[in-house]
Amino acid sequence: MADVLIVGDDLTGSNGAATGMARRGLRTATLRVGEAHERITAQRENYDALVVTTDSRHLPAAEAARLTAAAVRAAWPASFVSSRCDSTLRGNVGAQAQAVIDTVRELTDRPVIGLCMPAFPSADRQTVGGLQLMGGRRLELTELAHDVRTPMTSSSVAVALEKDSTLTCAHVDLETVTAGGRTLEDAMHQLLASSPDVLIGDAYTEDHLDELARAALAVRPEALWVGIDPGPGSWALAARMGLTGSEAARPLLAVSGSATELTRAQLAALGQSRAVSVVRPVFLPGTRRIDVEATARDVSRDLRAAAGTEPIVLLATVLDVSDIFDLTEAESDDIPHALGRVIRLVLEDTGDEESAPAVGGLYTTGGDVTAEVLDGLGGVGIEIHGEVVPLATSGTVVGGPAAGLPIVTKGGLVGDTDTAIVCLDALAQLARAGAPQYRDTPRTTSGKESS
């Protein structure tokens, strides 16, 4: 059966939620079946996660609830069920959430509690004080106030949930979420004493969503928690329940040698929205030349620490203005070459002599850096899989001991602030698809001699 069931109200949002599950190692499909709910049942055994869109965002609340309930019944049983809501609270948020919760209660003897975590940090959506923010602004103070079909008049998550429903809600504030641990668990325990249908959790980062999921399962492990969120909250719950891919994840390695303002902004956004371990290059005494061996040891150390969790290890020469120095022409020319040599040593070091390196994939920004990294790996080219964004390409390394290694490359002045996030997310998905081929690639001595 499908362990995960997500019911959404539009195709685009449902596809986004499905992508997150697929990125976490689940075989996932989005279904759009209309009234033919038997088609959902027919696919239960074929996928780990089913995401069903009811196309009901602009339908009357009662009709949206009917379609949602029918989808849950058709896909049951499932270990985890989620009501996918829009990150700006548009649509029949309350009616759909109640339909999921009520239907699951009919189908199981376990206590059923909703956990609403509508924050979507990588999309600049936060939940603070029980209010949903877009770019730090209340929804009714953005362009959504003038939406023709669903003008937003309130940012209150509770108001959205209680509209067209009889759901009762309790709120976990950001101060409690950030305290985490026992403080958060005790607060949740007290809130649940009044038996609300839904807990609403504030969150500003993905770590906050993960901590809310962890605490909920710790406080009421016997309950069946229903997700109510645009995607990230359900991904956190599914991961904490152990429903995501069981194969040990390989960390992703990102390499940046660019000092441009755009690159700095992209790396800053990446660090704010994803789990990133930053490695700064070690320089040879009295110079601005990179100490290749010392830097490689630091990168290898962080990769080993990250093994099994699929975070990102970022090797960056410049993160802010204070990192920019006046370099000689020789020092400037040496940076890409040194980074390529660092990556070669890292990939040689992180696996044993007979197996592939423990890296899920590479992200490089800048043409010179990409070329030197490819040379360092002994590669002769890249097999192109697709375009992530214009001038950012995904593929796998061709030739050398790292043949088949997933790689995403981007020009130094390409994209906007979120482009590094988009590229690393694409790399994570490609890494899962490319890992079997890469894992079987034998190491050769000739690759070690490349520079």
Image: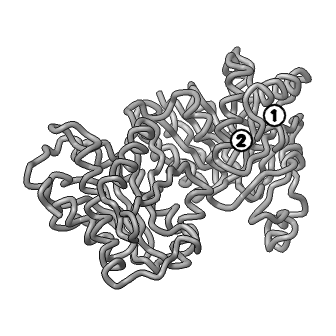
Decide: is 275 above or below 40: below
Amino acid residing under circle 1: Val
Where residue 184 sits, quadrant-wise, is top right
Q: Amino acid at mark 2?
A: Ile
Q: Position of residue 34 (x, y in %)?
A: 58, 49
Say which element carries label 1: strand
- Estimate how packed mark 2 is, as few (under 14), some (14 to 19) or many (20 or more) residues with alpha carbons within 10 Å: many
For the residues marked 1 and 2, what is the alpha-carbon distance in whole angstroms? 9 Å
Image coordinates of residue 414 in percent, x first then y, are 46, 78
Q: Is residue 172 left or right of residue 380?
A: right
Pointer 1 or 2: first along the chain: 1
Residue 198 image label: 1
**Residue 230 pos. (x, y %):** 66, 50
Going by the image, does 322 lie left or right of 438? right
147, 402: nearer the viewer = 402
Residue drawn at (69%, 22%) of the image: 218
Residues at discs 1 and 2 in contact (Cβ within 8 Å): yes
Furthest residue in direction bottom, as rendered? 329
Task: Pick whichever, 327 or 208, lies toward us.
Answer: 327
Instruction: Using the rendered view, name the quadrant where residue 338 is placed.
Output: bottom left
Residue 26 in view, yes or no: no
What residue is shown at x 56% (from left), y 25% (from top)? 77
* Residue 237 visible to the viewer: yes
**Residue at position x 19%, y 67% in the image:** 381
Identify residue for label 2: 228
Instruction: Identify which residue is drawn at 54% across, 77% down.
Output: 262
Q: How is the image coloured?
A: one colour
Is 109 displayed left or right of 296 in the figure? right
